[in-house]
């Protein structure tokens, strides 16, 4: 396989709608095919940066969980990225909520080389960094202004054919009192439970420097980065998409069936671009489960779908969850040509 073929195969391995969320409900225009080249471009951009330092924003509070806690998706992927990228000279600075910080520390400290990694609790963050990455991090939904601005950002040929609602039509779907709020997939408003870490993806947070290249990884439409996809596309594919769709775009957007899968894919893609093989202890489902068990216990963390304190992700069996990890390893080991 060539590098381009490997990158496409890795992207395809993670774009499976295992949760039946409607990520590709419309075969012509959906979340999976909205930004088809972004995955490869994100991998290349990071791989080309010597000694990259990535701020990774993660942590999603599940308010109706038992107990109320952050979910396993996103956090395990952040720990994996730290483990995977250290060997290629790339460091990460995790940025999260106070409720999620203990689990991140527990996962990172299982690796002696990462035991000194500092987990930042937003707004306790100081740059500079080469990139800002969000993994499974909720962001505020749309406003009438953001909806209009998003349409204006569309390429001219696309903009003319894109449906555009009137203000009254928009407000019928998304009333003013529900705008600029953060929602779970079940439409729980978690705005008051989450910090404004999404500000790190907007130019106002970097007044003396250009906005660093930003990357979003998500699996439901309500995460930072999904503002790159037209609101109309998300609302037509995702249940309650008109309410939950995040308005914050990123330079690159990686949509996966599970956000952690996006983290595995990003690390694998960087290895592909640099033309090297990963260490043997990566892309190992058994090791991922061992790390997750510790994080769930020490966090605590909960499964974001079931709300239970179990070492599972998005309500999947471990075999279902591990399948893309195994596939990515196979792709990485495939002969080059």
Image (cartoon, helix red, strand yellow):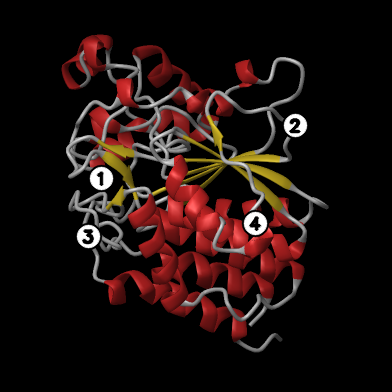
Q: Nearer the viewer, mark 2 or mark 4?
A: 4
Say few, some or many: other residues with alpha carbon within 10 Å of mark 1 (under 14 / 14 to 19 / 20 or more): many
For the point 64% across and 56% down, the residue is: 114
Residue 69 quadrant: top left
Give the mark, 2 or 4, whose residue is nearer the N terminus. Answer: 4
Query: Contact, CB < 8 Å: mark 3 with mark 2?
Result: no
User: Is 327 situated left or right of 293 in this image?
Assistant: right
Of the numbered discs in the image, which one, if any, rests on residue 114? 4
Secondary structure found at label 3: loop
The percent position of residue 143, horizontal first and vertical second, equals 35, 16
The label shown at residue 252 is none
* Of callouts 1 and 4, the N-terminal one: 4
Q: Which residue is mark 3?
A: 315
Q: Where residue 274 sits: x, y (%)?
A: 75, 68
Q: Would you place residue 120 above or below residue 78 in this image?
A: above
The residue sitting at 33% across, 53% down in the picture is 28
Q: Reading the chain from its start, which is encountered first: label 3 or label 4?
A: 4
Looking at this rendering, what residue extends furthest in the right direction?
50
Toward which corner of the image does residue 18 lie, by quadrant?
A: bottom left
Q: Which residue is mark 2?
A: 128
Q: Residue at x 22, y 19 (%)?
A: 174
Q: Residues within 10 Å of mark 4 (few under 14, many from 20)?
A: some
- Of badges 3 and 4, nearer the viewer stands 4
Among numbered discs 3 and 2, the one appearing first in the sequence: 2
Tag 1 residue: 237
């Amino acid at each position: 396989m060539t590098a381009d073929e490997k990158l496409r195969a890795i992207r395809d391995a993670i774009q499976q709608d295992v949760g039946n969320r409607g990520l590709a409900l419309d075969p012509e225009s959906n979340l999976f095919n909205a930004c088809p080249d972004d995955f490869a471009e994100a991998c290349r951009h990071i791989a080309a940066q010597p000694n990259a330092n990535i701020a990774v924003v993660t942590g999603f509070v599940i308010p109706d969980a038992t107990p109320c806690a952050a979910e396993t998706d996103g956090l395990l992927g952040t720990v994996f990225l730290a483990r995977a990228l250290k060997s290629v000279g790339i460091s990460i600075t995790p940025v999260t909520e106070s409720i999620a910080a203990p689990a991140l520390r527990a996962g990172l400290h299982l690796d002696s080389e990462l035991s000194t990694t500092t987990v930042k609790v937003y707004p306790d963050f100081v740059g500079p960094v080469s990139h800002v990455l969000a993994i499974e991090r909720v962001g505020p939904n749309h406003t009438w202004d953001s909806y209009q601005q998003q349409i204006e950002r569309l390429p001219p040929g696309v903009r003319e054919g894109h449906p555009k609602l009137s203000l009254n039509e928009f407000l019928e779907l998304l009333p003013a009192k529900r705008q600029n709020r953060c929602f779970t997939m079940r439409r729980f408003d978690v705005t008051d439970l989450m910090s404004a870490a999404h500000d790190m993806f907007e130019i106002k947070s970097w007044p003396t420097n250009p906005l660093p290249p930003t990357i979003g990884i998500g699996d439901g439409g309500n995460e930072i980065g999904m503002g790159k996809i037209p609101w109309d596309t998300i609302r037509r594919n995702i249940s309650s998409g008109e309410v939950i769709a995040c308005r914050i775009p990123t330079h690159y957007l990686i949509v996966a069936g599970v956000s952690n899968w996006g983290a595995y894919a990003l690390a694998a893609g960087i290895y592909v671009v640099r033309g090297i093989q990963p260490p043997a202890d990566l892309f190992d489902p058994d090791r991922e489960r061992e790390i997750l068990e510790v994080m769930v216990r020490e966090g605590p963390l909960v499964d974001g779908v079931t709300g239970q304190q179990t070492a599972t992700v998005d309500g999947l069996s471990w075999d279902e969850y591990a399948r893309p990890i195994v596939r990515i390893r196979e792709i990485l080991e495939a002969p080059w040509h």
